[in-house]
Structure formats: structure tokens, C-alpha cells
Amino acid sequence: IGLQGPPGPVYSFARKDPRMMLPARRIQERMGKRFFALHPQIPCRLYELQVSEHTYRAICRRVEAMYEEKELYHYNLLGTVAAFFQVGSWKRSHHYFCSQFVAELLVDSGAAELPRPPALSRPEDFRTMAKVQQVFQGRVGTLARWAA
């Protein structure tokens, strides 16, 4: 999730080392850096969701709190398997995978309703949200240049 538009940082739960899938953790990165710089040909889409100032501030506070207490948060590898197969919910305190993290932020803040609980969410769930608009489709490397 990006809170300052494409030039700003994006927050996620993903690979610790941009060259390896695991280990993973809570991360902050920018377009054109780290993973994005190593893999500029990966296809991507960027979506925008308009929210109220109150909702935006609530999401920002939650993200800031999570990054201040970064040692508490971990990657939810078991949750990714459960979400992939849509079986059960491996909701564990302070453990997230990327779409779970974003879904929980949006649902808990009241910014959006999703078709599945956050612990079972998939990236395609965000595409179908009410009021979401696609603002970019292309390669990650092109997005980095577009965002600059």
C-alpha cells in the first residue's frame, strides 16, 4: 500500500532480500529501488482508492504504529498457503502476508469492503472494490519512471 502516491514509499510484507523469496518480513520500499530495480519487467497495475481525510489518517496511524514496532511483526507464510487454497484462516497475531496486510488496513479503517476476510484475501480482490480506479498498467520499471 502506498499512502503518498507513486513517488512515495510502499509498505508491504514481502521478501527481506530482493533477490530471494524468503525470509520475508514487514518492508518499506520505493519504486525503482530494491526489488523493483532488480525486476523491471514484472507486469503490474496501480490502483487508487479515494478515502476521507479521517480514514486516510487512521490508515497512516496504523501503518506508522506497525513500523515503529517493527520487531513485533512477521511474515505469515502459513497464511499465504491457506489463502491460496481458500481453506481456513491462518490469522496469527502480528503476522501478515501482503494482501492480508492491505486488506486489513482497508477493512478495519472502513475504507472498503472485500469479498473475503483479510486473512484469505488475494491481490485480485482489490481490483473489484467499489470506488477503486486503475491509474497505471504496465511494467514495474515503467511505473518507476512514471512515478518519478
Image (cartoon, rainbow, N blue to C red):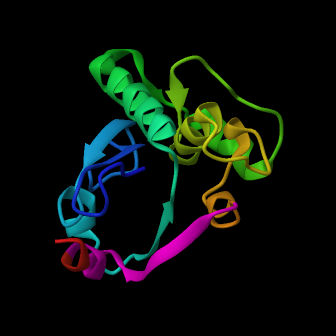
Taking 44 as reference, is 114 left or right?
A: right
- Between 83 and 147, the one nearer to me in the picture: 147
Q: Is residue 137 above or below residue 57?
A: below
Q: What is the span of residues highlighted in magenta in the rendered image?
A: 130-144
Specify the farthest residue to the right. Answer: 87
Image point (27%, 59%), residue name: 35
Q: In this view, does 59 lie above or below 93?
A: below
Q: Does the magenta stretch include residue 139?
A: yes
> Does any portion of residue 16 appear in the rendered image?
no
Position in image of residue 72 (x %, y %): 39, 15
Position in image of residue 41 (x %, y %): 33, 81
Image quarter in which the C terminus is found: bottom left
Position in image of residue 126 (x %, y %): 63, 59
Q: Is residue 42 above or below residue 30?
A: below
Taking 133 as reference, is 113 left or right?
A: right
Image point (29%, 63%), residue name: 6
Q: Residue 22 lies in what quarter of the image?
A: top left
Image point (33%, 74%), residue name: 140
Q: Residue 57 lies in what quarter of the image?
A: top left
> Does any portion of residue 56 appear in the rendered image?
yes
Q: Does the magenta stretch include residue 81?
A: no
Callout count: 0
Image point (53%, 44%), residue name: 102
- Between 67 and 84, the one nearer to me in the picture: 67
